[in-house]
Image (cartoon, rainbow, N blue to C red):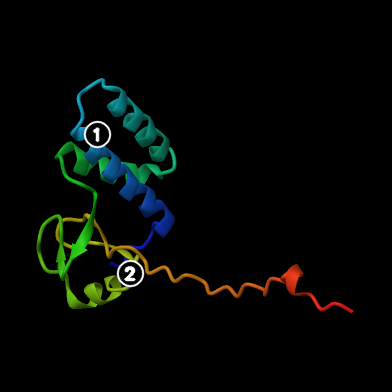
Amino acid sequence: MGQNMYTTAILDVLRDVNRLEGERRGLKEGSAAALQIEKQVAVARTKLPHSLLFLHDRFAACGKPSIVRLAGANCSACHLKLPSGELGALRVAGRYGVCPNCNAFVWSGPAAVSEPVTVQPAKSNPERSVRA
């Protein structure tokens, strides 16, 4: 997991590419929906570095995702348990790592998004204004 050479934003794009390609596999070849997804994949791929595309395409050629979600303590691609040190780093929501067994990117799941607390100013009510 020490191979964090790609940013979270880049790996989020890769996750989208994997998701879109999965959706595409379930559609009829040449259909409008398939063509739309192919366009989205093409746009997303332009945002990825060549080295990452090379890795992704190797997985895709075998019909496997290049990025998988952490499943308990296991890699979802090869189903083997990750080493405890690497697993500890992945326990933080939104983190990515690399499975030391199959080399798939492993994602720990969505980062916890806390809603910012905003205080609304009191609205004045013109009907309740003080009359002199």
Residue that label 2 marks = 93
CA separation in Å, label 2 and label 1: 28 Å
Residue 4 shown left or right of residue 90 in the figure? right
Q: Is residue 96 above or below residue 128?
A: above
Q: What is the crowding at mark 2: few (fewer than 14 residues within 10 Å), some, or many (at least 20)?
A: some
Question: Where residue 31 sits in the image (x, y, percent)?
Answer: 26, 22
**Secondary structure under the numbered disc 1 in the rendered image:** helix
For image coordinates 37% across by 69% down, the residue present is 112
| Among the two numbered marks 2 and 1 on one chain, the one whose residue lies closer to the N terminus | 1
| Image quadrant in which the C terminus is located | bottom right
Amino acid bearing label 2: Ala
Left or right: 47 as drawn, with respect to 83:
right
Q: Quadrant of residue 35?
A: top left
Residue displayed at 28% across by 28% down: 34
Q: Is residue 7 visible?
A: no
Describe residue 54's horizontal placement relative to residue 123 as left or right: left
Q: Percent x, y for residue 12? A: 37, 53
Residue designated by label 1: 24
**Is label 2 in contact with label 1 (beta carbons under 8 Å)?**
no
